[in-house]
Amino acid sequence: MSDLGLNQASFEVQGGDRSRVVGALNLVTVGDLLSVGGNAIARGDAALVDLSGVGHSDSAGLALLIEWLSVAHAAGKTLRYENMPTQLQQLARLSELEGLLLPELNSSP
């Protein structure tokens, strides 16, 4: 099994408005991802970010996702995350940011 490790991550534009993140979201990796992902989001190349490839994340990863939402908002773009790992969902819930990052979980019938 291939593992990028805890100190590596990549942001991949997949075409259309889809992109994905692979690797770890932590203090070591988020600096590079911030600008690469932010630029793609601002251009409209990343309205949907697939997080299924994220193997590990901490609060720095959560901060990155929030910052990307801010970049999208400033650029007048929409941004949605899909396949958010349980670890990130739990951090969002504990930080009371679930509705911001995962609005579909917050909608009530």
Image (cartoon, rainbow, N blue to C red):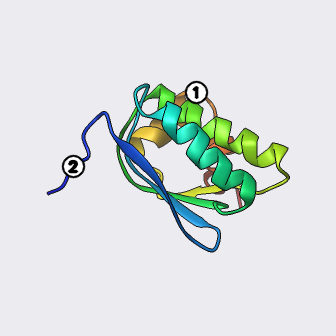
What residue appears at the point 72 percent right and 61 percent down from the top-left corner? 44
Residue type, label 1: Ser
Q: Is residue 48 left or right of residue 25?
A: right
Residue placed most toward the observer, 79 or 105: 79
CA neighbours of label 2 inside 10 A, class few (<14), some (14 to 19), many (20+): few
Q: Residue at 61%, 53% (x, y): give it.
A: 105
- Within 10 Å of disc 1 (Cα), the crowding (few <14, some 14-19, many 20+) is few
Q: Is residue 78 above or below residue 30?
A: below
Question: Which of the pair 32/51 is nearer the observer?
Answer: 32
The answer to whether residue 3 is above or below residue 12 is: above
Q: Which mark is residue 59?
A: none
As helix, strand or loop, the secondary structure at mark 2 comes to loop
Q: Quadrant of residue 80?
A: bottom right
- Residue most toward the left? 1
* Residue 104 visible in the snapshot: yes
The mark nearer the N terminus, 2 or 1, is 2
- In the rendered view of the protein, which quadrant contains the C terminus? bottom right
| Label disc, if present, on residue 95 of the rendered structure | 1
* Percent of width and height locating residue 42: 74, 52
Identify the residue shown where x is 47% and y is 58%.
Answer: 83
Q: As drawn, is 19 to the left or to the right of 46?
A: left
In the image, 89: left or right of 44?
Answer: left
Asked whether the beta carbons under mark 2 and mark 1 sit within 8 Å of each other, the answer is no
The total of numbered circles placed on residues is: 2
The three-letter code of the residue at mark 2 reads Asp
Residue 93 drawn at (x, y percent): 55, 35
Question: Is label 1 in a helix, a strand or a loop?
Answer: loop
**Which of the two marks, 2 or 1, is nearer to us in this view?**
2
- Where does the N terminus fall, quadrant-wise? bottom left
Cα gap from disc 2 to disc 1, whole angstroms: 28 Å
Residue topped by disc 2: 3
Q: Position of residue 39 (x, y in %)?
A: 66, 49
